[in-house]
Image: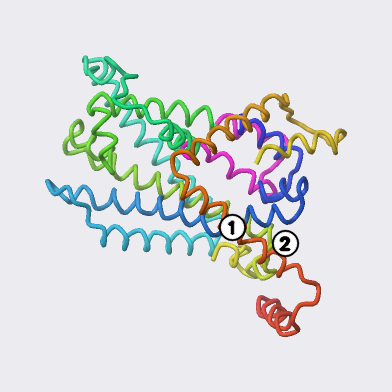
Amino acid sequence: MEAMSFAELGSSHPKSGGEFIYIKESFGPLLAFLRVWTNVLIMSPAMAALQTMVIGTYIVTPFLGDCQEPLYGAVRLLAACVMFLIFFINCTSVPLTVRIQSFLTVSKIFGLAVLIGSGLILLFNGHTDSFRNPFHVNQFQFGGLASAFMAGRYAFGGWAILNNLTEEIKNPEKNLPRSIFVTLLLVFTIYMMANITYLTAMTAEEMLASDAVAVIFAKRTLGSWSWVIWVSVVLCAAGQLNGASLSRARMYFVAAREGALPEVLSLVHVRWKTPLPAAAVTVRIFYFRRKLPDLPRPYKVYLIVPGMFIFFNLIIVGMAFYDRPVEAVLGIVTTVIGIPFYLFSRRKNRSNRIQLYMGKLDVSSL
């Protein structure tokens, strides 16, 4: 439902920036600023940390042998190195970033094909113990349902990256919705098959307890070829990090161009043509339908679709407050703290020193 809504928003507003642009044009600059604020302080760092930690974990785990305690120091060091490398590539060249992304995508599809193929062989040979009572739950926790929904949304939410890159897509009115739907269907199919594959050699409890599920599966089923799987997982996580970094930089670039962030973040490197400093939501559909009824919409969804999505998200938010009220309140507080910063940035009579400093940055970028 969210993907369908974003497909309409992206095709009818062919501007980079994604959610920032949609919120700004429907609810004003304050809420748009707060969206970028939470992205900068919470969402982007947390997602990048998670992705790089996955890479570090899957690089280290195959060398642990029977030792089950992860080497957190080595994992963090590898994560930091990967983060710096991805940052450098995104700052250096857009064509290089795209080529690397294409290579990583092909590599992870190959690895997933090997994994799924081996799982299907096990399934056809009768390894079905984990499927005999698939919906059995030892203890149901209402709050845990919110975590499950959020984990699922994270796994399938990569299509939102495209809306941040609309201006760099050829014929976005047609290609953006098409790309969203094709990739969403493909990812859903692959992820479902991958989870079925894991359950042919592992129990659900083992999957929940492991930090490197694919490595355990590969060791049990592929023997000396298990390296193919963990290398593929590393490349998969690297591809996710690279694509997210490319997308996030464009959001910050557009936010700076629109005046929500410091102007220096809207600068483009004179030689590499990348937004170098920039690299260092669905209810608005109702607003656009009412305020801009004649706006060309190459792709259009029924309003019940975003309505249902909003309803389900409200339920998830309510469950999150029920399960982890402290973390939920901290999230709201962090967002509200951004309001004074927004008001300060919008002051008309800014210090001459700040203006002079920004001018020097503009000149130095040339």
Q: Which residues are magenta?
A: 154-182
Residue 43 visible here:
no
Return the x and y of residue 295 as percentages of the image width and height: 84, 36
Residue drawn at the location 16% of the way across and 50% of the way down = 64
Front residue of 94 and 71: 71
Q: Which residue matches tag 2?
A: 257
Q: Which mark is residue 158?
A: none
Q: Which structural element holds mark 2?
A: helix
Q: Quadrant of the N terminus?
A: top right
Residue 176 visible here:
yes
Q: Which mark is residue 249?
A: 1
Q: Which structural element holds mark 1?
A: helix
In the image, residue 232 above or below residue 46: above
Packing grade of label 2 (10 A; few <14, some 14-19, many >=20) is some
Q: Quadrant of the C terminus?
A: bottom right
Front residue of 105 and 242: 242
Q: Amino acid at mark 1?
A: Ala
